[in-house]
Amino acid sequence: MSHGIKQVLKPVSLTLMKTILFKEAHLINRGKIFEGDLLVKGHRIERIDPSISVQGAVTEIAVGGRHLMPGIIDDQVHFREPGLEQKGSIFTESMAAIAGGVTSFMEMPNTRPPAVTQELLEAKYQLGSTQAWANYSFYMGTTNDNLEEVLKTDPANVCGVKVFMGSSTGNMLVDNKSTLERLFESCPLLIATHCEDEATIKRNMAEAHERYGKVVPPSAHPWIRSREACLLSSSLAVELAKKHNTRLHILHISTADEIALFEQGPVGNKRITSEACVHHMYFSDQDYLTLGNQIKCNPAIKTADDRAAILKAVFEDKIDVIATDHAPHTWEEKSQPYETAPSGLPLVQHPLNLMLFHWQDGRIKLERIIEKMCHAPADCFRIADRGYLDEGYFADIVMVDLDKETKVTKESLLYKCAWSPLEGRNLPGRIEGTWVNGVRLFEDGKVIGEPSGERLMFYA
């Protein structure tokens, strides 16, 4: 369904403006898996039918029983540009994204400088216009003193406002209660929050020093950045959103305790929504013993019981969206002692494979995975004409072979940081093609062509 938003696409050579006919596919869309053909003309899906024949020049792709799904929309990534390009860039990390079936991303403002003015935010959009392989949007950042700038943000072409109600870089920690009150009261955009209570974390860190001395182990991370810290901050965000009827989206839920804050039901009916990340549903606190700082992230990966509760909440529609929180750091940074090693891990190249791990074991249906990774982000953020395999929608399409596996090797990684906590693992499913706006950019394990991502547009 079109929502009346016009999107101006960059000039594309006529050789790229192809008619493509996908034949004999298993299509996954709107809670169903069905056999059929799919026709793309230019940037958009023209037709879906049990059988389609086309006259004239057409590129025909024999899907042969493999699955076609909408491109994944990742609502939380850190691509590190500008200012932190030693970790990653919009070019390198969005290239890894399309290899992982991610055709649209929303990137966070805690770069250097942080995107906390309209000028700095627009500078990131200019970078995206030439460097992004996938479609893109960038969050407006908040501080304790930039509300006037935040309120200038255009909801038609910016995904939302990001609030760090817990540690962040620079001055992006928003811990002033009156500032939060004014923001939730006056902001017309979706507010996406990182929820951890800073005072609780500082107390826990002091206790860790008493217990361990100067060398705190990575295994202490989940109780330093504790469930209490998460619940206290998430509860405050929900309280403010209910008071002011704010569109609130709480990112990376990491505890079973927080799930009670959210209501069950379709994402389109909610003012308060939530996100789960693939690593919080794959790893547990036991993995710190072998992976250490590689899986150090904020909020922390917690217990196996939390992991199971989060996956269950995703399946039961209490948690709405699945994302990665892709956050690369160099291997040298991650090799530092626990307290100085930065938080975050690179994941955007394998989110579908990680969720297929749960599908393979019977914990979640394939249709629900597509709903949470493709449909729900589009509905939650009100993205125009993306997230579905629907006639008239942009042709953001992923072809996946569920009978094959993906082995994660250092040589296959496209991240600039060149490492992954998944190295050496065989994950179910293999992505065999990614199309962004009707242009094939990933084929036979290789990125091809040139960046052709477009700025995401949104409807009120």
Image (tube, rainbow, N blue to C red):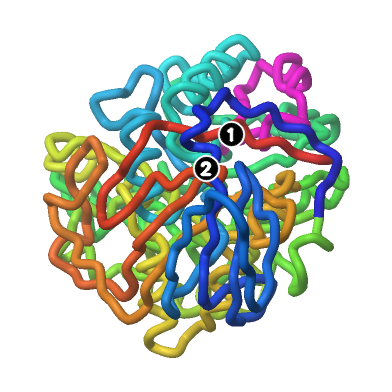
Query: Is residue 57 at all visible to an observer of this figure?
Result: yes
- Secondary structure of the residue carrying numbered label 2: strand
Residue 315 in the image: x percent, y percent?
A: 59, 78
Instruction: Tell me if residue 441 comes above or below residue 234 in the rendering.
Output: above
Q: Quadrant of residue 9?
A: top right
Residue in view at x 53 percent, y 17 percent: 126
Task: Read off the magenta span.
Answer: 139-164
Name the residue tied to disc 1: 137
Q: Does 49 sit left or right of 397 as displayed?
A: right
**Residue in the picture at 59% in, 76% down:** 368
Residue picked out by circle 2: 105
Pinpoint residue 56: horizontal percent, then vertical percent: 58, 52
Is residue 170 rendered to the left or right of residue 424? right
Give the mark count.
2
Indicate whether residue 228 is drawn in magenta. Answer: no
Give the distance between the C-alpha atoms of the residues marked 1 and 2, in whole angstroms: 6 Å
Looking at the rendered structure, the kind of residue marked 2 is Phe
Left or right: where 187 falls relative to 279? right
Q: Is residue 59 above or below residue 81?
A: below
Give the x, y percent position of residue 313.
Answer: 60, 75
Q: Nearer the viewer, residue 275 or 261?
A: 275
Q: Residue furthest bottom?
A: 362
For marks 1 and 2 on the same chain, the one whose residue lies earlier in the sequence: 2
